[in-house]
Image (cartoon, rainbow, N blue to C red):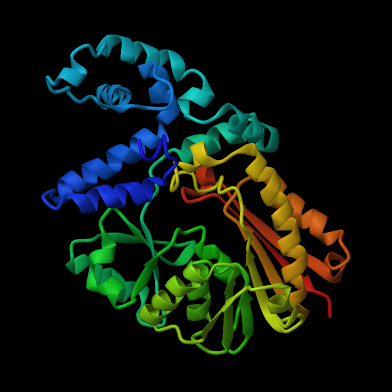
Amino acid sequence: MAIFNEGEYADKVVARALKKDKRWGSHDRKFVAETIYEIVRWKRLYTEIAEVKEPFDRDKIWRIFAVWAVLRGYTLPDWKYFEDTPVRRIKGKFDELTKTRKFRESIPDWMDELGVKELGEETWTKELAAQNEQAKVILRVNKLKTTKEKLRAILMDLNIETEFHKDYPDALILTERANVFLTDAFKDGLFEVQDASSQLVAYFLDVQPGMRVVDTCAGAGGKTLHLASLMENKGQLIAMDLYESKLKQLKIRAKRNGAFNIEPRVIESTKTIKKLHEKADRVLIDAPCSGLGVLKRNPDSKWKLQPEFIDNIRKVQAEVLENYSKIVKPGGKLVYATCSVLPSENQEQIKHFLSTEIGKEFNFVKDQKVLAHESGFDGFYMALLERKK
């Protein structure tokens, strides 16, 4: 109810629920967490089958749960909540509704229409299906402290099996989900959890040890830490963000990672940016976006996103590109990245930027669009630009 009626984020609610009851074993915890995520992911389909509308009270939640259980093949216990569960009708309605994409993939009408408009019927259909599969757990080895082979062996001793992937040099992919945050290897900073697509960005920026690199939207610093490891801790890595709380998290993570060339800076005003004009060899703009490439990781954003938000975020992206690109020195490089699959947030933003006054000082080098149904990982976009000398 906290998730659906009060708009809370699923991961926060799940964490709180698991903390509250200390008697649950790991099996129970896994069941609770996965069930909540499943119901959030398939909310539209399940509520349609259960014939309930928001706001949800306890009885409606039980009806939705009953639908989930029947479709998963569980036998319902003989509790009063489940007395009149129409098992056959649930299956019949499921077969009927899943012929239509917006019910089958469980998304709002406007999002379905937007996806078709931007990616076309065929690509959007495949992409949506991929975005509804459970995300894999992927680690990024911290090369400042260890190697991929050593880390794999350490985890193997803990019965955590991982595999390499030829296209992702720093990635270890878990063959089965496990809570890796409890391991000493994590506490000692040997790895971070980071999706494979996100791991491509730091390589795309082409950093070298000794450079001055600015990560303009660092957040809690997943990509910043990767950059630090590719720079071998040499040079200066300025991590900027609007929110001090996120940079505080980054400081904690950097300490654990043994990454000490990172300098966090809060963007307090335009002055913070102006001070850096034409001073950086490399600039990363990991722009705020709709997140339509990472729905498998954040299924509740399907219900939180609004069309107005996407319109606004496109304006923000254009501003961020225009303002932060000025940090790149002549001959330096810039990467613009998003975790969205919409061309309007990606290729079209770059095209627009290159037509602006500052944009005319840049050459387009290359870009890469990653779709979940092709890669098996998150949807992502990155473009590399070089400032003319």
Residue depicted at x 49% and y 68% = 246
Answer whether residue 198 is visible to the viewer in this image. Answer: yes
Above/below status of 290 relative to 97: below
- Residue 269: x and y, percent? 69, 73
Residue depicted at x 23% and y 46% = 30
Looking at the figure, which quarter contains the N terminus? top left
Residue depicted at x 38% and y 68% = 192
Q: Is residue 243 left or right of residue 47?
A: right
Answer whether residue 221 is visible to the viewer in this image. Answer: no
Q: Nearer the viewer, residue 126 or 64?
A: 64
Name which quarter of the figure residue 357 lies in. bottom right
- Residue 343: x and y, percent? 69, 46
Above/below status of 88 relative to 136: above
Looking at the figure, which quarter contains the C terminus? bottom right
Q: Nearer the viewer, residue 159 or 316?
A: 316
- Residue 217: x and y, percent? 60, 67
- Residue 41: x and y, percent? 41, 36
Q: Is residue 72 left or right of residue 311?
A: left
Q: Is residue 250 left or right of residue 91?
A: right
Name which quarter of the figure residue 258 lies in. bottom left
Above/below status of 167 relative to 131: below
Q: Nearer the viewer, residue 93 or 364?
A: 93
Residue depicted at x 59% and y 90% = 210
Q: How many numbered marks are there?
A: 0
